[in-house]
Image: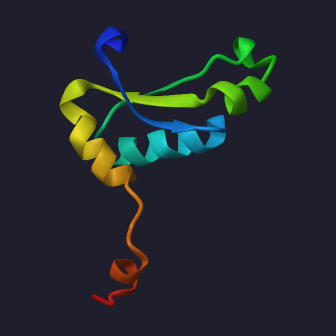
Amino acid sequence: MDRASAIVVESFSDKTFAEAAAELLASEGIEALVVSDDAGGLLPNLDFARGVRLMVAPTDVERARGILAPVDDAEALGDQ
């Protein structure tokens, strides 16, 4: 994936959550980048302040957002 054309699909306050989301997308065949500015890991508190971005190729944006979208509790329980 070309990083210059990648689009942010979600922002997180913690790199661990962003990496978990990237793994979820990878399990669905979508390549994702986790981008943060935490001084190379020296200042992880900057992730909370600035956010950690999850980016995908433009062709995968809609599908990635659908996968990451919260599930309606009633739908998840089968109560439609």
Q: Is residue 5 left or right of residue 41?
A: left
Indicate whether 54 appears above or below 66. Answer: above
Relative depth, front residue between 30 and 10: 10
In the displayed image of the protein, which residue is found farthest to the left?
A: 59
Q: How is the image coloured?
A: rainbow
Q: Quadrant of the C terminus?
A: bottom left
Residue drawn at x 42%, y 61% as measured from the top left: 70
Q: Position of residue 51 (x, y in %)?
A: 61, 30
Relative depth, front residue between 79 and 16: 79
Number of marks in the rendered image: 0
Q: Quadrant of the N terminus?
A: top left
In the displayed image of the protein, which residue is found farthest to the front?
A: 49
In the displayed image of the protein, which residue is found farthest to the bottom?
A: 79
Q: Is residue 34 left or right of residue 65?
A: right
In the displayed image of the protein, which residue is found farthest to the top?
A: 4
Q: Position of residue 67 (x, y in %)?
A: 33, 52
Q: Is residue 19 left or right of residue 57?
A: right
Residue drawn at x 22%, y 41% as measured from the top left: 62
Residue drawn at x 64%, y 41% as measured from the top left: 16
Residue drawn at x 27%, y 25% as measured from the top left: 57
Indicate whether 76 appears above or below 34. Answer: below
Q: Position of residue 42 (x, y in %)?
A: 81, 17
